[in-house]
């Protein structure tokens, strides 16, 4: 698709976790590629990770005081209506000041007020749903959206069928490395000749995975299996005090910024089953053990993980079985080369390398009309 000489303004909104933020950043990068003179603004939730990650990617962001519904502490929701009203008011002001040609929402409670107000003002809105089970915010906004971009089939259960465009999930550009897997391992400080397992509980970390990996560190040393362990910011200080930053063949990090290098170097990835993570794994054809988080809305990660397992791209492990079975499963897979190849081929079936381009092309087609 050739770039457009027209000048457009776009607002992207979504956040709370990396699973909503990184797709929005990927779409913004493609919008800049296709509309070199466009203006882009992000809107997220105050004090959430998008307020850090978006500026690090070179974009301006404004925050809303919106918060999500707290299922664990119902009393803490007492101020939710007031924060929602304030967020709607501020979102309307942002829209009137910036005057966007289109608004794109990638899910999460942060995107709700902005897209709702955009729809009231008659501004074209587009939704990108990453998961196999649609999020609450996106379901509420779907009726008045122009198009809904999805990664999984069967989403007409939640969205108007005539608005759905199956594109795959927009992901960061992870498949552009030209170095070998061995060179990627060496750049991360590992030995090229030994298998490497990359463990991540997502951008926020996962305590149950961290406990299981901490207990299994002797197995990694004994079996000469290397470990890159992203534990999450909230867990890093405690785990560093317990294990140190690195062992003989493993490294502990709070956050891995070079995910392209980590995925490229790994022989096996242990991860939560967020849709964006799965899409990134598919892009590089990386074998995985997927452990759905039980703390997400409508248990959507279980739907994601089972869809990938059915295609032969990963092994599913329930959260309650992690402590007992994770280390056994890791060493069962990582020492089985035919199984690694089989999982890699299955994961590639989910690859949608042109997802972001398809999304932007659909937006451009609407704007050109």
Image (cartoon, grey):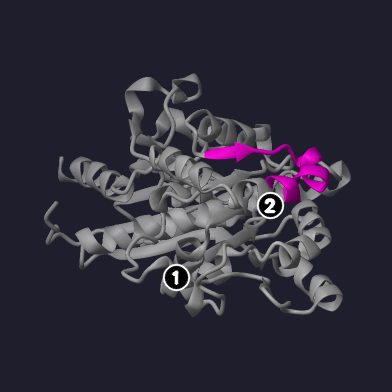
Q: What is the magenta segment's predominant secondary structure?
A: helix
- On the image, the x and y values in percent for residue 209 come to 75, 53
The residue indicated by pointer 1 is 182
Secondary structure beneath dot 1 equals helix
Q: Nearer the viewer, residue 61 or 121?
A: 61
Q: Is residue 195 left or right of residue 69?
A: left
- On the image, the x and y values in percent for residue 98 come to 37, 62
Q: Is residue 133 left or right of residue 227?
A: left
Dot 1, crowdedness within 10 Å: few (<14), some or many (≥20)?
some
What segment carries the magenta color? Answer: 314-329
Q: Nearer the viewer, residue 282 or 204?
A: 282
The residue depicted at 44 percent of the width and 21 percent of the height is 156
- On the image, the x and y values in percent for residue 40 come to 35, 64
Whether residue 204 appears in magenta in the rendering, the answer is no
> Earlier along the polypeptide chain: callout 1 or callout 2?
2
Q: Nearer the viewer, residue 50 or 349?
A: 349
Q: How many marks?
A: 2
Q: Is residue 145 left or right of residue 43?
A: left
- On the image, the x and y values in percent for residue 32 come to 27, 64
Whether residue 317 appears in magenta in the rendering, the answer is yes
- Which one is closest to the eye, mark 1 or mark 2? 1
Secondary structure beneath dot 2 equals loop
In this rendering, the answer to whether 290 lies above or below 91 is: above
Q: Is residue 96 left or right of residue 112?
A: left
Dot 2, crowdedness within 10 Å: few (<14), some or many (≥20)?
many
Q: Nearer the viewer, residue 329 or 208?
A: 329
The residue indicated by pointer 2 is 67
The residue depicted at 40 percent of the width and 64 percent of the height is 41
């Amino acid at each position: 698709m050739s770039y457009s000489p027209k000048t457009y303004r776009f607002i992207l909104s979504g956040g709370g976790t990396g699973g909503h933020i990184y797709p929005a950043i990927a779409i913004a990068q493609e919008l800049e590629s296709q509309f070199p003179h466009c203006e882009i603004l992000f809107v997220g939730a105050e004090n959430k990770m998008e307020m850090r990650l978006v500026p690090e990617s070179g974009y301006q962001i404004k925050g809303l005081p919106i918060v999500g519904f707290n299922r664990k502490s119902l009393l803490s929701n007492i101020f939710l209506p007031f924060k929602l009203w304030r967020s709607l008011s501020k979102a309307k002001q942002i829209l009137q000041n910036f005057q966007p040609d289109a608004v794109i929402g990638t899910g999460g409670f942060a995107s709700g007020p902005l897209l709702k107000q955009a729809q009231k003002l008659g501004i074209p809105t587009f939704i990108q749903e990453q998961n196999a089970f649609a999020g609450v915010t996106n379901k509420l906004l779907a009726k008045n959206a122009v198009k809904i971009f999805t990664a999984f089939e069967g989403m007409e259960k939640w969205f108007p069928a005539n608005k759905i465009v199956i594109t795959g999930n927009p992901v960061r550009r992870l498949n552009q490395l030209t170095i070998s897997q061995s060179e990627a391992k060496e750049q991360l400080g590992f030995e090229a000749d030994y298998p490497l397992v990359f463990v991540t509980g997502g951008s926020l970390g996962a305590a149950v995975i961290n406990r299981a990996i901490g207990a299994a560190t002797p197995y990694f040393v004994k079996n000469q299996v290397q470990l890159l362990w992203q534990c999450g910011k909230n867990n890093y200080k405690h785990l560093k005090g317990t294990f140190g930053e690195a062992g003989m063949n493993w490294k502990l990090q709070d956050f891995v910024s070079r995910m392209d290098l980590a995925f490229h170097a790994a022989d096996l990835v242990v991860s939560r089953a967020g849709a964006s993570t799965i899409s990134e794994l598919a892009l590089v054809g990386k074998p995985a053990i997927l452990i759905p988080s039980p703390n997400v809305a409508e248990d959507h990660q279980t739907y994601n993980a089972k869809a990938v397992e059915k295609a032969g791209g990963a092994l599913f492990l329930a959260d309650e079985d992690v402590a007992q079975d994770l280390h056994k499963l890791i060493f069962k897979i990582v020492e089985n080369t035919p199984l690694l190849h089989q999982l890699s081929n299955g994961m590639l079936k989910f690859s949608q390398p042109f997802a972001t381009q398809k999304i932007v092309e659909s937006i451009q087609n609407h704007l050109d009309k």
